Image (cartoon, grey):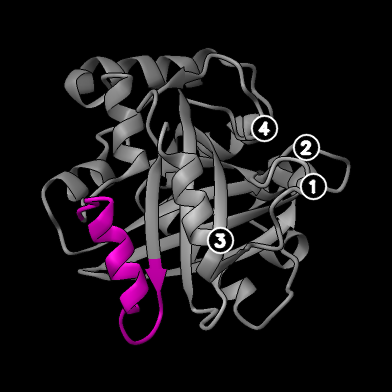
Amino acid sequence: NAVLPALREQLEVFMVKDRYVQKDTGQYTIRSIYMDTYALDYYREKESGIQHRKKLRIRAYNECCADARAFLEIKRKDNMSIAKTRAPFCFADVAALFASGDVERYIDAVNSQALPAARAFFFHMYRYALKPIALICYEREAFFARADSSLRITLDKNLRSAPFPALDELYSEKSMLPALAGYFILEVKFYKGSIPGWLKSFLERHQLERMALSKYAISLESHRMPQSARTFSTLAQSQVIHRKRSGVERSMAYSRATG
């Protein structure tokens, strides 16, 4: 974190801040609930180096408000290529959406891809009996290159997480455990061509080497979930059984019954 001011100053010569950052802080908060099996199949695919894999998550930003929007997302990774589909909905409808799976009623069809993306999300969730495994939050500074808006750099800070969230806890900060204390993650994202010369020099000057980092994997490991998979599975199922049966829990019970 100590190098952040110098990095930021140099990036701003070639880049502009994302228009979604908050003016008073220069960043925004990302909140995600990641879905996985009790056996942590998605986590283990990543650790095994499977080249073609996916993650399902519910994502929202900043703080909750009356008209807060959230998104069903599927992130797919094929070797070095990453693709993402998403479907927006009103967060106030999260319980009803997951209890019914009625995407036509609750998904905001802002484009032609929203409803197919939502149907794919629920297909994978029911087929593999996916459950909410981790709530992961962090603050992000985002920049776009002045000469090429397809080049983006993000600085993700204050990574923190909580296990076994209820779906309506997407904006919760309780029981959060920090990870990578004192460090942030810099990501370079580009959609065409290659990175420009100035960015190559920037990376070399700061001795930044490419690493495979997964915030999901880091967060699970900070809670020692993979090391205690059997205990983890028992505990998670116990929490589902004893939690107050809301509409969200009925949806989870339905997904177990249908496989």
Circle 2 sits on which residue? 64
Rendered position, 117 above or below 165: below
Kind of element beneath mark 3:
helix
Magenta region includes residue 18: no
Horizontally, residue 228 falls left or right of residue 129, namely left
Earlier along the polypeptide chain: callout 2 or callout 3? 3
Viewer-closest of 92 and 69: 69
Which is more foreground, mark 3 or mark 4?
A: 3
Residue at 67% from the left image edge and 32% from the top image edge: 171
The kind of secondary structure element at disc 2 is loop
Q: Distance between the residues labelled 1 and 3?
A: 30 Å
Where, by quadrant of the figure, is residue 210 drawn? bottom left
Q: Say which residue label 1 marks.
A: 68
Q: Position of residue 244 (x, y in %)?
A: 64, 17
Instruction: Specify which label sits upstream in the sequence, 1 or 3.
Output: 3
Residue for point 60% across, 16% down: 174
- Magenta-drawn segment: 189-209
The residue labelled by disc 4 is: 171
Q: Answer yes or no: do the residues labelled 1 and 2 have beta carbons within 8 Å? A: yes
Q: Do the residues labelled 2 and 4 touch (CB within 8 Å)?
A: yes
Q: Badge 2, how many Cα within 10 Å: few under 14, some, many 20+? A: some
**Label 3 Cα neighbours within 10 Å, binned few <14 / some 14-19 / many ≥20:** some
Which residue occupies the extreme right position in the image? 66
Eyeballing the image, is 243 above or below 49? above
Give the residue type that dot 4 points to: Tyr
Q: Distance between the residues labelled 2 and 3?
A: 30 Å
Q: Give amino acid for label 1.
A: Ala
Residue type pointed to by label 3: Glu
Residue at (46% x, 41% y) in the render: 4
Residue at numbered disc 3: 12
Left of 59 or right of it: where is 215? left
Q: Disc 4 or 1, which lies upstream in sequence?
A: 1
